[in-house]
Image (cartoon, grey):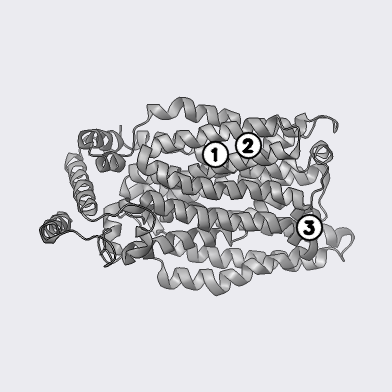
Amino acid sequence: MGLVFNIVLAVFAATGSFLFGYDSGVMALVIQSPHFLHYFDTEKYSSTIGAINSTFSGGAVFGALMGGSTMDRFGRRWTVLIGAAINLLGAALQTGARNLAMILVGRILAGWAVGVLSMSVPIYQSECAHPRNRGMIVGITQQMIGVGFIVSTWVGYGASKVPKTSSFSWRFPLGFQCIPCIMIIAGILFFPESPRHLMEKDKADEAMAVLRKLHFDGSNEEWIQSEFNEIKLTIEAEKAITAPGWSIMFKVKAWRMRLLHATLMQVFTQMTGINVIGYYSSLLYETLGIEGDKKLLLVSIYNIVGPVCNLFFIVFVLDRVGRRKPLLFGTAGITMALIAEAAIGSQVKGASGARRNGLSIGGVFFIFLVSCIFSMSFGPISWVYASEIMPLSIRGHGSAFATAIGNWLVGTVWSQVSPIGLGKTEYKFYFIFVAFNICVTFPTIFFMFKETKKLSLEEIDLLFGERALGTLPDDLEKPGREEQVELQQVQAEVNKSR
């Protein structure tokens, strides 16, 4: 079936990423509902609103960590199914909420599920993708996150048209997330397990069948066999010295460096400020003097811009130019856009009439520009780079740690403090992200990050200076002399196959 089936698999798996985008974006509209604010006795800039968003991100931290274990034990597609089932429960609690506790528990469960999905979907896609188009395949994760944001805001916008006394304005948007959950639960078992996971579980025949289903085009039998052999030999080499548990990825130098890269990739993505804009965009528009239906409409249009740019980028650019250059461009571009946004924010309150309208338009432009640049840099590349640089031995645990700590833990902090910070400091809040991008993100990417375009997952092992298996430290059990000789022979075969 080849590329077409590979794309279908990636899109379906990314329904989990759709839930990520929908669950993240839906609260931006829900907190605009007068009935919601009255029902839960709160207001837009309160710590309660921050808690509703931060519990989602906090739940995702633990969900991502859990996903690291379930992926190794049950596989990639079963982990996706588990995430969807947990999300379904969380969605039901939020929809039927009678008090704040039910909302918070529902948001924790939804966050837990999205944490599982956010680390498992990119790995599933990455392990099934062909090296020459892995950027596009894994980039579908970000595409579906964007689509989730789009659907959430238009569903919320439509639901806002009911009378202010109706709970439909917030219950329906929260309940809508049940639909993609049911789709995943019903359909995921019709798709194959990752060939690399099958190989790791000693199911070589099934792994070969899946490889052919994913990549055979009628004329590349030799490449299929070569890829199969490379995966098999690398896994055999890793199994010879792999130690169980979480601590091993911190103790082996080669693995520790790759874990650092993946975690920093997620941290840098959060430090663009994109999720602060996503969660609290309606509040940002208020500071620009835009309110009412016009504000809600802008939130809805904003969420379309990113996915359009992302689709163009992953289809036509990412696998051609690679990872590093777009990240460097994205850091510089987002930084300049945030500086411009802050400059406009410092002037808009003192303006009046036509000048105020002009500044408001300029402020909207730069908010939209941040989304465009992000969608052609950090948005898709954060998932691609973090998933492809992990060796198979720690891919589950390593990706879980990077996503939980780098993405969700940092995101939890911003979810909690942002409504308070925006309310008190307004435009000055942007300079936190500006300073970090200039002082940390740009130099780190420039000096540390490696280019991985069009390399197989096994070739990326060599890119980091040694095979994925590295060298175990003295305090861990090492193979005996016979096993070491055997291991060296396996390594020689792997290198020879290149």
Q: Are marks 1 and 2 in contact (CB under 8 Å)?
A: yes
Badge 1 amino acid: Phe
Horizontal arrangement in the rendering, residue 208 relative to residue 329 (left or right): left
Which residue is label 1 attached to?
A: 18
Q: Which mark sits nearer the N-terminus, 1 or 2?
A: 1
Where is residue 468? Give x, y as percent.
Answer: 28, 58
Mark number for residue 251? none
In x, y percent, where is residue 428? 73, 68
Query: Does any portion of residue 193 appear in the rendered image?
Result: yes
Tell me what residue is drawn at x 58 percent, y 43 percent. Answer: 111
How far apart, in angstroms, are the residues tagged by discs 1 and 3? 31 Å
Q: Amino acid at mark 3?
A: Ser
Q: Position of residue 441 (x, y in %)?
A: 52, 68
Question: Which numbered disc flags the more N-terminal residue, 3 or 2?
Answer: 2
Query: Is residue 222 toward the left or the right of residue 172 in the image?
Result: left
Label 1 secondary element:
helix
Indicate the secondary structure of the residue bearing disc 2.
helix
Q: Residues within 10 Å of mark 2 (few under 14, many from 20)?
A: many
Q: Do tag 3 and tag 2 residues touch (Cβ < 8 Å)? A: no
Quick check: can you spot residue 376?
no
Q: Position of residue 320 (x, y in %)?
A: 38, 55
Q: Secondary structure at mark 3?
A: helix
At x 49% / y 51%, what residue is drawn? 380
Quarter of the figure with residue 465:
bottom left
| Residue tagged 3 | 360
Residue highlighted by disc 2: 151
**Image position of 131 with respect to 258: above or below:** above
Q: Residue furthest top?
A: 186
Q: Residue at x 70, y 29 (%)?
A: 96
Give the Cα distance between marks 3 and 2: 25 Å
